[in-house]
Amino acid sequence: MSATEQFIESDELHPIDIVETIAEHHAWEFDRVADDQIAMAVEGQWRTYSLTLAWSPYDETLRLICTFEMEPPEESLPRLYEALNRTNDMCWTGAFTYWHEQRLMVYRYGLALNGGQIVSPQQIDQLISSAVATSERFYPAFQLVCWTDRSVDDALQVAIAEAYGRA
């Protein structure tokens, strides 16, 4: 019986329980922080991403936060913020922000499940995969903006271009 079938047949459909099962399936390191929150590490091509998913019963929202450390030079912050604005224009789901005090790049997404809707394991798996893929896509552009003299337009072309194979 697959993990998906196990949840479909179960009365216990807490979103964080589903996330935990998905994390176990993928062999991701995780920590069940609370009944309504889980933190995990997902290995990408560029780096390991820290993901936190939290369920808010108050507004019936499953929140995802995907972070990675980034310590750009102070003088590059205006260009980074410009790149973030332009990047968010290209993202249909979720958005990036930079938490300067914590030195973290953050991708956030909230899945509203109002009216007692139930999230499926496939939706959660897609949510996590999309967060990591989007972070992977824009990571090189953020790096170029912060540590080179390339323009924001030029750096974002790296994220827009489709790559084939690996270097």
Image (cartoon, rainbow, N blue to C red):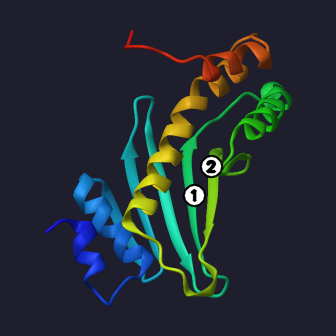
Task: Write the residue at 57% across / 57% down.
Answer: 65
Are the residues at dot 2 and dot 1 in contact (C-beta closer than 8 Å)? yes
The residue identified by callout 2 is 107
Residue 29 has which mark? none
Q: Is residue 89 above or below residue 27?
A: above
The 10 Å Cα crowd at callout 2, few under 14, some 14 to 19, many 20 or more, is many
Apparent side of residue 19 relative to residue 49 in the rendered image (left or right):
left
- In space, the residues marked 2 and 1 are separated at their CA atoms by 6 Å
Kind of residue at disc 2: Tyr
Q: Is residue 46 above or below residue 24?
A: above
The residue identified by callout 1 is 65
Q: Secondary structure at mark 2?
A: strand
Where's the C terminus, which quadrant?
top left
Apparent side of residue 129 relative to residue 64 in the rendered image (left or right):
left
* Image coords of residue 157 (percent x, y): 68, 16
Q: Is residue 81 above or below residue 1?
A: above
* Image coords of residue 81 (percent x, y): 81, 35
Where's the N terminus, which quadrant?
bottom left
Q: Earlier in the sequence, mark 2 or mark 1?
A: 1
Task: Write the residue at 56% across / 87% down.
Answer: 116
Task: Residue lying at the far left in this picture: please name it.
Answer: 1
Observer-nearest residue: 10 or 65?
10
Observer-nearest residue: 8 or 149?
8
Q: Is residue 96 above or below residue 32?
A: above
Task: Write the residue at 58% across / 67% down.
Answer: 63
Q: Give the total number of marks visible in the rendering.
A: 2
Apparent side of residue 38 relative to residue 62 in the rendered image (left or right):
left
Q: Quadrant of residue 64?
A: bottom right
Apparent side of residue 82 relative to residue 43 in the rendered image (left or right):
right
Q: Quadrant of residue 139?
A: top right
* Image coords of residue 107 (percent x, y): 62, 49
